[in-house]
Image (tube, helix red, strand yellow):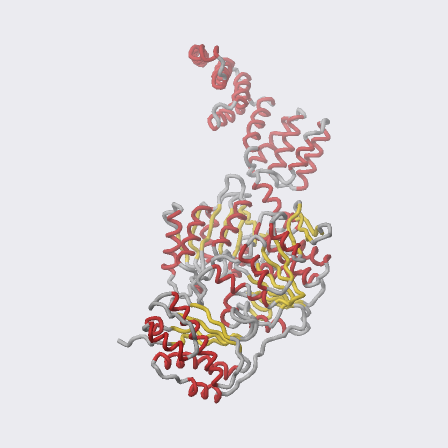
Amino acid sequence: MTSAPAVAATEVRVLEGPNLYFAKPAIKVSLELPGYLSADEADLKKLARSVGLKSSRPGAPGTEQRQRFVMRLVERATRRLAAASGTTRLGVRTRPGSDPAQVVVAFVWRRRGRARALGEGVAPLLQSWLDGDDQVEALGAQVAAAEPGERPSLITPTIPVASITGTNGKTTTTRLLGHIGMTAGLRTAWSSTDGIVVQGEVIEGGDYSGPAGARGVLTAPGVQLGILETARGGMLLKGMGVSANDVSVVTNVSADHLGLQGIDTVDQLAEVKAIVTKATKPRGWAVLNGEDPRVWAMRSGTKARPWVFTLRSDAPAVREALDAGGRAITVLDGDIAVLENGQDPDRLVSILDVPATLSGLSVHNIANALAGAAAALGLGLPRAAVVEGLKSFAPDDQLNPGRMNTYTLRREDGSAITVIVDLAHNEAGLDALMDVAHGLKVPGGQVHLGLGLAGDRTDDLLESIGEVAGLRADRIVAAHKEHYLRGRTMEELEGHLRTGLARAGVADIDSYPTELGGLQALVPGASDGDVVALMCHAERSQVASWLAEQGAVADGPDDIRRKVVAARGEHEFETQIAELWELDDDQARIEAATSLRTSRPGDARLVYELAATLDAAGREKDAIDLYRDALASGLREPHRHRARIQLASSLRVTGQPDLAHSLLTELSHERPGSVAVEAFRALAAYDSGRGAEAVADLIDTLLHHAGDEDSLSYQRALHGYAAQLRDA
């Protein structure tokens, strides 16, 4: 068996733009150094002296101190090799790897070929030192003899540019900012995980959230404004695609894609996200989430001015930004408002008039709207265009595909369900999806979830998402992404989801290999007013097509507002309904109710209110068919119960006491002890010639609710007399 080498370079990577190590192109060398980690301490002290590292304490083998010593040694090796090749000045930085034997060294480059040769020479030099043979001159000569290669091709923008990053919300914020740019009349291009988009048209599909996307945007003909979604992967693998930006946006940082490319903690991930802020021009703006401590801390590492966004106007970050000469954007009395020292708040628009917020229900999209508006203003776009852009950016599958797209799917029996399609690619995203789902379902309704993730998540994250799903959804199926398993098997991925589900008490779920298959399984089992939520990434277009085939219609702002109101147990015309019952004139009340019903002919609640106005005016016969229509159209509680009582009362008054008594008996069994039901039932019994039964029922009901001393003393006797009346 071959033993592992004492020194090895596992990767020599060329970073084309600003990166985790420098604000300019760099070479990153990943090293495995088990030989140094286990070497004798005395030998390493001797080596340190020979290469000019004074006062060095290598530490015991295998310790973190040994790793720190090796980092210094790696830096010295890189500098000495550069000097031997003829480079006298070189920026060099080292970082520890996740394992004590791992070290990363990075240095700035100006010519690709020679820089790569330098990176490739570091490991052989370190190996020679470990072997007691200093090969620095020979290796330096090899580097010097290498072809210089091309210079960096990093783009320096000549138009305003915004770079947007974060764990959640960056694509939506990118699309919103692009929409505002077009609203302002600028030829706007943006790049994202969907592709390169110019004026709303995808000219190159695919994941372009890295340097290739930046190049595609900034080289597109006639573009006046560039917006770059800047993902973690691109910055780690190639660096940023531009030398600088005018505005940077960081939406948030949470656990996602950890354990990849040396990023194992959320703090390390925040370092990566901060790259975009360090590339922001001094007179530009860093738009930062003031409610995320890791994001807000990025203000100390950028030369740009801070522009904080937060849903809380009293957040400490607001004061800190304003004290630093920056700005804030927040929610003030329900309005999106910009704050600046020495000026009155600039109220842009009500949250309720921003469709992307789903009538204020989607908290994370409120944050995205704040970030997008701040970025637009920071780029110098006109205030009027920002306001209009916020009001016209809809969360549909045209302007913001795959992000909280909501649909209404009506069935032949008149019932309807809501379908939400959202990426929800991590724990925070699923929580946000569940918030919206619960905010749109009717009282007593259920949430049905199609649960699925890509395979490049840690085991812990998969299990946590399974637990969130189990706690917050009423019915769950696995809806997998066959083409995004990324090294896992479907069974392995689902196993971790099931572990999390089990923690929440969910014993078993059905499983489907595709997102569409999961949706098709969920929809038939959803009842009127329920919500079906699908975590969807791989099959957005297929899902949208299938929904269209089923007759589903994308919700507009008015539809969403109506659902939000209904979810609160209210009606969107609740105010108008209350006002009509304040009218003293019967005919005026009937006319007002008729007008409301005409505006929404199929609305069961409005049919019920019209019936009630006729009933109150003594026109019980006209009310009966309307009560029945309202009940048949799916009138919901508590009005359904009231409509049945009122229908029975109207039937009694119009000479149908037996039918009224039968209906009220059903209600009595459903809600035993209801005084109103028993009173109306007694009246129907009396009109049917069953006066004794009516008195008996009233006695029993009265005793059920009474608690005075006499009632308690004579309870048995009175119940006995009631029984005798029924037997008479």
Number of marks present in the image shown: 0
567 lies left or right of 383:
left
Residue 110 image point, x, y percent:
55, 80
Q: Which of 602 and 580 is in front in this view?
A: 580
Residue at figure coordinates x 55%, y 75% from the top left: 25
Compared to residue 497, the image places residue 686 above or below, namely: above
Q: Which of 162 and 171 is in front in this view?
A: 162
Residue 407 image point, x, y percent:
56, 51
Q: In which quarter of the image is the N terminus?
A: bottom left
Q: Which of 103 and 69 is in front in this view?
A: 69
Residue at figure coordinates x 39%, y 68% from the top left: 67
Q: Which of 231 and 406 is in front in this view?
A: 231
Q: Can residue 643 be seen in this view?
A: yes
Q: Can residue 201 be seen in this view?
A: no
618 lies left or right of 466:
right
Compared to residue 87, the image places residue 307 above or below, namely: above
Compared to residue 187, the image places residue 328 above or below, namely: above
Q: In which quarter of the image is the C terminus?
A: top left
Residue at figure coordinates x 52%, y 51% from the top left: 433
Residue at figure coordinates x 47%, y 28% from the top left: 670
Residue 211 image point, x, y percent:
56, 72
Residue most extreme to the left? 1
Residue 466 image point, x, y percent:
42, 52
